[in-house]
Image: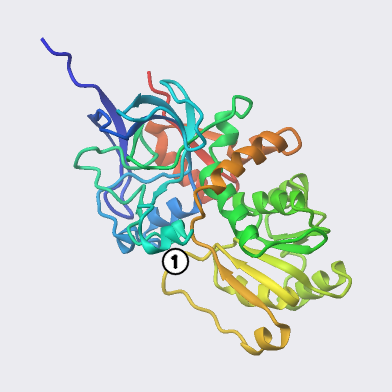
């Protein structure tokens, strides 16, 4: 008699405004080139909160409902499909190997992929966009397993880096690393980070590691400003004290020898931050726009600022998958210098995911995390 098929849990997301439903579904066997991942930790990212509310419509990206949300994850190899023996750096993989992987999957053959723009793949697929009511079911991070498709980029996690620290690598950390690489942030430059949530804290740390002369963080939550300093910010500006954009611009000028910022990183996620951020830039300043993912939101600005200031704005969506390998190196090198463990301090079992999202919405926890805790 054949053994009964294995089963695992998913937190099924049917539509915005409705609670997640914990559902038990069959665990798929990986096909050729695929990897079945046992999820050990998945963070609640801002985009998950937006999808939960319906302000970030996964359907607009080709997604379907019901689905499984969650993408900022780390896990261990549960089963390797045929033809898979190593990660994307050639390191051997076996059952139990701890891994991270980009949550989006490129074809590697389209025009954009061949031009080195894999994050703009014409055939891009992504976690959170597949159906939760059809095999393989495990299409997002909020479940016991995740089925990694054939051809996906995957990296072994260094033994010295815990799951708690590694879980933020495949989204928040890689995204801001890629953004600062895109604008070629240089040694000795002034950097302003708008927003000191998880992405902002990573941006502060990476900017300092790249040699920024001074990093200035702007936020309105005292706990986050304290964390910003711990992550390397030289100065912080509390918007509850400097209440107007004009006041904050004056402070930034004073902190940058009257020059203004060379680089401003926007990770607030509200269009109103952009107009202010552009004012904070000095001559030839570069604006890194990451936070605004809600389609249809707009802001008014004076384009002459770009012309007379020789300024540049760079939109950053996803990242080149190779950045994730460098993100792991960054974590291995800096984990004892930075309070990285504080980024995911609040943990919830999968069964309590609705409570976790309610807590994460309060924004005091920088990153709440779902830890499936498979029996």
The residue at the point 56 percent across, 84 percent down is 300
Circle 1 residues within 10 Å: few <14, some 14–19, many ≥20? some
Picture coordinates of residue 164 (x, y %)? 57, 32
Picture coordinates of residue 103 (x, y %)? 42, 46
The residue at the point 89 percent across, 71 percent down is 257
The residue at the point 32 percent across, 64 percent down is 60
- Vertical order, 149 against 216 (above or below): above
The quadrant of the rendering that contains the N terminus is top left
Query: Is any atom of residue 373 visible in this view?
Result: yes
The residue at the point 55 percent across, 62 percent down is 291
- Residue receiving disc 1: 294
- Vertical order, 271 against 153 (above or below): below
> In this view of the protein, which residue sits in the foreground, 121 or 113?
113
Picture coordinates of residue 275 (x, y %)? 63, 77
Question: On the picture, is 3 further left or further right than 299?
Answer: left
Q: What is the secondary structure assignment of the residue under circle 1?
A: loop
> In this view of the protein, which residue sits in the foreground, 111 or 191?
111
Picture coordinates of residue 306 (x, y %)? 66, 84
> In this view of the protein, which residue sits in the foreground, 4 or 319?
319
Question: Residue 166's quadrant in the figure?
Answer: top right
Query: Is any atom of residue 244 visible in this view?
Result: no
């Amino acid at each position: 008699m054949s053994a009964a098929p294995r089963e695992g849990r998913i937190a099924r997301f049917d539509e915005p405004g409705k609670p997640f439903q914990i559902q038990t579904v069959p665990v798929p066997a990986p096909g050729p080139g695929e990897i079945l991942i046992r999820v050990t930790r998945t963070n609640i990212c801002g985009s998950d909160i937006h999808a939960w509310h319906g302000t970030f419509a996964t359907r607009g990206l080709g997604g379907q409902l019901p689905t499984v949300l969650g993408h900022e994850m780390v896990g261990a190899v549960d089963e390797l499909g045929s033809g898979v023996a190593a990660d994307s750096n050639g390191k051997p993989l076996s059952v139990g190997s701890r891994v991270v992987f980009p949550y989006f999957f490129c074809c590697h053959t389209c025009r954009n992929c061949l031009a080195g723009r894999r994050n703009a793949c014409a055939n891009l697929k992504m976690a959170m966009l597949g159906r939760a009511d059809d095999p393989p079911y495990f299409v997002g991070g909020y479940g016991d397993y995740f089925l990694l498709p054939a051809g996906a980029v995957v990296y072994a996690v260094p033994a010295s880096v815990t799951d708690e620290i590694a879980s933020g690598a495949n989204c928040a950390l890689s995204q801001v690393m890629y953004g600062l690489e895109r604008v070629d942030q240089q040694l000795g430059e002034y950097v302003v980070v708008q927003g000191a949530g998880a992405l902002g804290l990573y941006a502060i740390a990476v900017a300092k590691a790249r040699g920024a002369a001074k990093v200035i963080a702007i936020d309105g939550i005292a706990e986050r400003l304290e964390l910003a300093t711990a992550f390397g910010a030289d100065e912080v500006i509390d918007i509850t004290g400097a209440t107007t954009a004009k006041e904050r611009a004056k402070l930034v000028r004073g902190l940058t020898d009257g020059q203004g910022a060379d680089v401003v990183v926007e990770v607030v996620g509200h269009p109103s931050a952009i107009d202010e951020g552009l004012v904070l830039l000095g001559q030839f300043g570069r604006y890194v726009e990451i936070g605004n993912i809600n389609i249809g939101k707009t802001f008014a600005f004076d384009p002459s600022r770009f012309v007379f200031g020789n300024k540049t704005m760079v939109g950053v969506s996803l990242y080149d998958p190779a950045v994730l390998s460098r993100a792991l190196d960054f974590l291995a090198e800096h984990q004892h210098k930075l309070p990285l463990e504080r980024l995911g301090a609040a943990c919830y079992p999968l069964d309590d995911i609705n409570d976790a999202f309610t807590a994460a919405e309060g924004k005091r926890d920088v990153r709440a995390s779902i830890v499936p805790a498979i029996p």
